Amino acid sequence: MIGGADREVAGFAAGADGAGAGDHYLERVAARLRMPADAERDVIDELRAHLDDARAALEAEGLDPDKAEREAMARLGSPDALGDDLRRTHHTRRRLIAAAGGGVWDGLKDAITGYIVGIIVVLIVFMGLGTLAQRLLGPASLNAFGGRGVETAYSGALFSIAAWWGARGLVRSMARRSLRRTAALRAPIALAGALPLTVLLLVWPLHYNWGGIAAMLALPVSWAVAALTTPEPGRRSRWSFGRPSPRLLGGGAIAVFVVPLALYLISPVTTVTTNQSWAADDVLARMPDQEHWVALGYNVVAPTVVDLQRSRWTSTPFPDRNGNVALSLDNDTIDWDELADLRAEAWAALPSNRWVETLDPRAVGPYAVVPLQPWAATAAIVSVGAKPGIDAYLVFVTGVDRATGKRVAIGYPEGEEVAFTGTIVDWFAWLGP
Amino acid sequence: MPFRQIGSQLVKGTTPLLVLTVIGEGELYGYEIAQAVRERSGGAFAPSEGSLYPTLHRLELDGALVADWRASDRGPRRRYYKLTKAGRGMLAESRTEWSALVRAVDAVSSGG
């Protein structure tokens, strides 16, 4: 035949494993294809059909089966060359670029799915943990589930799950679209995602502490590990644990969802409503003791009494909004019945980007005071006003302990729920440097 | 009288034209395509069967062919190829180019 029969195939013979010479030939072709399993199967099936037809025709011409098979393989030529030709045909640059575009889209969709799944998982897990903690250790244990550190951990967990799903989706999609094996794409995709993510997180202007940085660095690590361990479609990976049994799934569902849900349902319910009351007003109605505070040099602005629900509280300062402070209350850890004369107090502070702010050592009292009333609403925005010469401030909720008659600092601007008897200055002395 | 066989380099360049031509007359699978070319050329053209499949796949990627699997009574399933509208255009263009090439080669080789 034209082009000549390639004698390289003459060495193929039926193996001791029972596989025919044709099978060995096709294995050599397959080894050169480097395609996903399903695409490889299609190509090999097509060639197998060709070999079968050619062998049958040659046998019909009088060749014995062994010679007919050898001749059929010889006509197809070197299996290595054939595999290389087919791989080059399919592994084009244009196809890879198109696969990258489609893969990014698929990866993005998977990342969003992962984020949603992450929210569900985190909610279920932390709802369960929180409920168990509340039942076993009391309401105060819920404090462990709040605060900015834990919120950073939540965010890190959610983004890491999203990154995991996104990386795997991208690798799988690009492999499918470009007819390449995932092994050829894992490392480049791991690097292409993890490197910019790491740089972005390190240069992003956020005031992370080391714990936060560690939590957020889980994102590129998750991306890289997911990309590097993406299994070949249709092939069992050592990283794949297969589909869990229905019994295991059922037990897991009961453990992470049903039991905590049941405990949650039988636990004392804290009803939290979410209306807001606004203290800021154009008309500055005078507090009863405004003259007293003004006489002391404080800038008292509180036209109305702010309603707050019995709860712990957190505050978020907005320095760029001229002293507006959002007070929000989100669970029940403070016994407000024991407190009288609740106030939000604004104290001058030293500018700082650390979590623990520093009180201005010259401050001997608040420069603004807003009266509060518990048990009505969960959030309020209090305008404490800006005061010339004060660049930073801290806001506290204080109340008078009915038992001792002493004023108690109930909170701290970042939300730690520590009740402290004494003045704000005493409290900072207690906190230490 | 059998045709004289043609050199492999010449055949290589004409394989897409030959493949498109025989598929244009009906849906065929790989082995049938090779046989059809061989028989219709009286054995003069027998495309290297190893180069046939890369050519078929490339034409499919270019949109000239579509393929689908069908079960077979004689063994494994077969992959049948069919010409698309784009493939017909490609075939017509290839024929025109080939005619121009033949005329030019004739003109040169006949001394002019």
Image (cartoon, coloured by chain):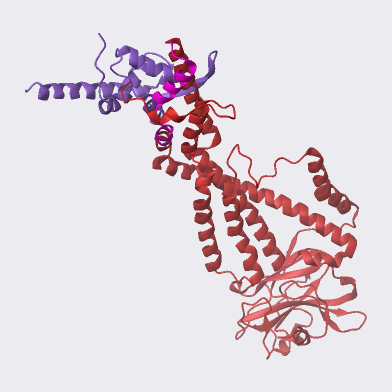
Chain colours: A red, B purple
Q: Nearer the viewer, residue B37 or A210?
A: B37
On whether residue A70 falls in the magenta region, the answer is yes
On the rendered structure, is A69 left or right of A106?
left
Task: Tell me which residue sits at (82%, 71%) in the image.
Answer: A373
Residue A133: name its quadrant.
Answer: bottom right
Q: Main secondary structure of the magenta part?
A: helix
Q: Nearer the viewer, residue A220 or A85?
A: A85
In the image, residue A168 above or below residue A208: above
In the image, residue B37 above or below residue A253: above
Q: Position of residue A21 (x, y in %)?
A: 50, 26
Q: Position of residue A339 (x, y in %)?
A: 87, 76
Task: Tell me which residue sits at (73%, 54%) in the image.
Answer: A122
Start-end of magenta stretch:
A62-84
Task: Tell me which residue sits at (36%, 25%) in the image.
Answer: A5
On the rendered structure, is A42 left or right of A153?
left
Residue B58: name its quadrant.
Answer: top left
In the image, residue A320 above or below residue A44: below
Task: Tell me which residue sits at (54%, 46%) in the image.
Answer: A170
Q: Nearer the viewer, residue A416 or A294?
A: A416
On whether residue A115 falls in the magenta region, the answer is no
Residue B54: name its quadrant.
Answer: top left
